[in-house]
Amino acid sequence: MRQNNTNPESWRLWFTHASNNMVDFSRIGERVIASKNWFPHYSQKEIADRLLIFASTLIAGYAGYASAPQNPESVRDTWQSRMVLSALSGFFVLQLVVILLLIQKRRNMQSMNECTASIEQSVDFSLSVQQLLTLGKKSVAIFDIDNTLLITIGYRPNASRTRQSGYGSDIWFSAVFSQLDKTSPDFHTMYLLLLSEYFIIQQHAQHVTTEDCVPALLAQLKENNISVLGLTTRTSCISDITLQRLAELGIQFSHHDAETMTLPVSIKDCSDDAIFKQGVIFCSGRSKKLCLDAFINTSLGLSLFQGVETVLFMDDKLSHCEEVSQYLRLRVPASRTVHYTHVEEDLPVADKAQIDEDRSRLSVELEREFRF
């Protein structure tokens, strides 16, 4: 009998909510693409307008000072002059601060645009990895897990392993999460229940690699003395089942025997630590950039990245590609980042009937386990 740590009441509560259409599972088949625009667009004209206001304020301030009585005849004239000069000075400083902020944001935007432009987009896992093999340089390869190395295809015992995003996949989770009412007082509870269901599914779901070539190519990288690491937002509480599923698919990372390490990256309202375990950095919902940086600054990370000439990072989410690419380019200028879109663009998504069937089967299985 499989060991089960799931709270049956939590599962039943969430299942009841979902079944009562608090979550519209009819939309699970729709693809969900999340993107972030970190910096608004500030044009040169907007900055020029601010500079014009700044210059006008400066001129007005000088004119006010020049027109003020040099030998005031009364206390009233003195206070009027001081009030005018104080107001103009305050406005002057305010405009100067705004201009500096606009310039800084524009620089950040330009940096982000340059970073995004340098990110390669690919649906071919083999092609992206083969390029690294031909360089002949000391390299490190870092891979996201979900939708980059493997896909969760759902809970279908004795069924053929169709390569598609199913019940428990990243696309399924994003679709359900997007339908939760974030203004509801029950949002936090519903989100925790959704996470609970996701964790439960991972213990029972079937997985396949994104492409048949994935295990062999990762092994080939290691044979060529290229360190292969995993970097995932998955929480450490499902690290064991994640590593087990990867091993079943023939995927094992470098430094598999290294000691498990807790990474000092804090986050609000998250009890699970970010960890490095068997070659994988489990971020537990934290920033991938911060977790990668925390790992690199460990003794193992410093040793691993010493003398590295290029780094390959591959992820299916553009937002992760952007933040990690910017970080890696500062550390290893010759780094490459690949936005891997094969799952999003080429593979099917399970429809509502398949999702409902999987949920029903899993519910029956869990009830049977709870009973015994």
Image (spheres, helix red, strand yellow):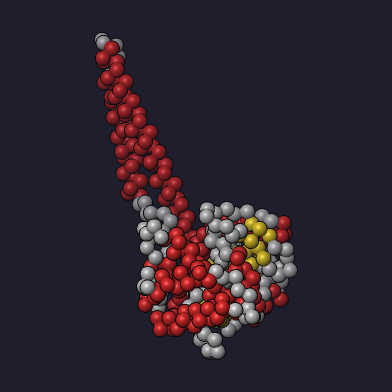
Residue at 57%, 57% (x, y): give it: 271
Return the residue nearer the eye: 185 or 69. Answer: 185
Please tell me how many numbered marks the rendered image carries.
0
Return the residue nearer the eye: 363 or 221. Answer: 363
Residue at 32%, 49% (x, y): give it: 45
Residue at 61%, 64% (x, y): give it: 236
Q: Is residue 252 left or right of residue 165?
A: right
The answer to whether 91 is drawn above or below residue 166 in the figure is above
Residue at 67%, 65% (x, y): give it: 277
Determine the image quadrant of residue 333: bottom right
Return the residue nearer the eye: 106 or 232. Answer: 232
Return the residue nearer the eye: 308 or 294. Answer: 294
Q: Is residue 362 visible to the viewer in this orientation of the structure?
A: no
The answer to whether 58 is drawn above or below residue 175 in the figure is above
Q: Is residue 244 visible to the viewer in this orientation of the structure?
A: yes
Q: Where residue 54 sits in the image (x, y, percent)?
A: 33, 37
Q: Where residue 85 sits in the image (x, y, percent)?
A: 32, 24
Q: Residue furthest front?
A: 371
Q: In this view, does 248 lie to the left or right of 270?
A: right
- State which quarter of the image contains the N terminus: bottom right
Q: Is residue 103 left or right of residue 141?
A: left
- State which quarter of the image contains the C terminus: bottom right
Q: Where residue 71 sits in the image (x, y, percent)?
A: 29, 11
Q: Where residue 96 sits in the image (x, y, percent)?
A: 39, 37
Determine the image quadrant of residue 265: bottom right
